Image (tube, rainbow, N blue to C red):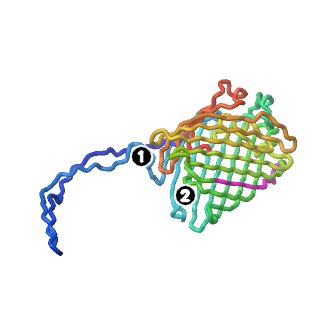
Amino acid sequence: MLLLCAGNVLLASDDVRTEGVYSNVVRSEDGRSVTVTRSTKPTQVRVRKSQPRFFDQIYMLDLPVMAVPVVAYSPETNWEFGAGVAGFFYAGDNRRRSFAQLNGAYTLNRQWYLSFASNLYFDNGWFMQVRAGYRDYPDYWFGIGNGIDEHLVATRYNSRRGHLTLQPQYRLPLNWSVGLNINMLHERTADPVLGYGKTWLTGVGAVVQYDSRDELYYPRRGLFFKTIASYYYSAYTPVGSLGLVSIDLRHYVPLYKDLIFAWQLVAEAALGENKPFQLLPTIGGQDLLRGVRRQMFRDDMALALQAELRIPVWDVLKATVFAGVGDVYNLGNWHWAVPKVSYGAGLRVMFNAAKVNLRFDVARTNVNPSWRADGWSFYLTCTEAF
């Protein structure tokens, strides 16, 4: 999402100061004695104040609370408009700043949502990631599988979903951390065939993470690895239980100064019988294989590889070219199909000290004609895809 912010701009100016300056200094040495002749005639010294540039003032804002409008665009939602408020504070660990953010928006596809996100860093080695939200989303059901032809016809349905995710983790030496993954999901659909009308799911599992990135939002170098293994069950609805395993591996390599090559490998698998479609792995969207409609392809397993070349242009302006390939597969009846290929380019504008970027991407894929007649997809949001 796009967080629009503005601040006061300080203009650079010249200042003339009159100071007593030592001048015409003559030194004569005679053994131990040193004689200094000086003139106290005032001399004008022109001093140029060091003032940040316009863009420096914008992205160096360091406010404890920010309330901003939310503007974003993606093919799945069309334009969305709303508001958000974010607070930045220290929750015990004075080296890392915690944050809490609340957003709400309405889209031109008659979808709306409320979301809450927070990262809390404590002084005892623990940190907590919290994600929660509720959404009312008219959407499309494309079926299960990786074939393209059978996905040309979609069924429209309405989904009302609430979710809560808690990930308490403990920091270990050498950039590692371990913790728990607690996930609760409640969804009501307009069509009882899709998830039996009402679905309650609770998941509990483990998280293992390695993070050596030099920055959180726009890293120049480092490695990120995260794997989650969870068991989901339902005590109130007749959906089956399942295990969900995911792997997210990212590598950032500086090629020359601010020229960066980044790549990401994502794998996710759902294990079990009578799996609820809400938890089936999927590809596509604004972050993974841009250009492919998110949730258009679902199945027991998703696998995707994508890469970006991040190019400095001028000051806070950067560009990127990207490409990716991936697909979904059925573990019990493996069916090979043409992999889904994504490629495109984009622009970035950095607007705060945390190096959060405004992101605009244009993407194409080899499956676009099945859901976009013009073949192009556009995304306007904040933060990098990975």
Q: Nearer the viewer, residue 370 or 315?
A: 315
Q: Nearer the viewer, residue 255 or 248?
A: 255
Residue in view at x 51 percent, y 58 percent: 89
Tag in front: 1 or 2: 1
Number of numbered tags placed on the structure image: 2
Residue at mark 1 to residue at mark 2: CA–CA distance = 23 Å
Q: Earlier in the sequence, mark 1 or mark 2?
A: 1
Q: Is residue 236 magenta?
A: yes
Q: In x, y percent, where is residue 297?
A: 75, 37
Query: Hey, what amino acid is under mark 2?
Result: Ser
Query: Hey, what amino acid is under mark 1?
Result: Asp
Q: Nearer the viewer, residue 278 or 283?
A: 283
Q: Which residue is mark 1?
A: 56
Can residue 130 be seen at all in this image of the molecule? yes
Q: Residues within 10 Å of mark 2 (few under 14, many from 20)?
A: many
Residue in view at x 60 percent, y 50 percent: 116
Q: Secondary structure at mark 1?
A: helix
Q: Which residue is mark 2?
A: 98
Image-based side of 172 in relation to 214, left or right: right
Q: Residue 20 is drawn in which quadrant?
A: bottom left
Quick check: 236 above or below 196? below
Can residue 78 be seen at all in this image of the molecule? no
Quick check: 100 above or below 311? below
Which part of the image, by quadrant, shows the N terminus? Answer: top right
The span shown in magenta is 224-237
Quick check: 279 above or below 38? above
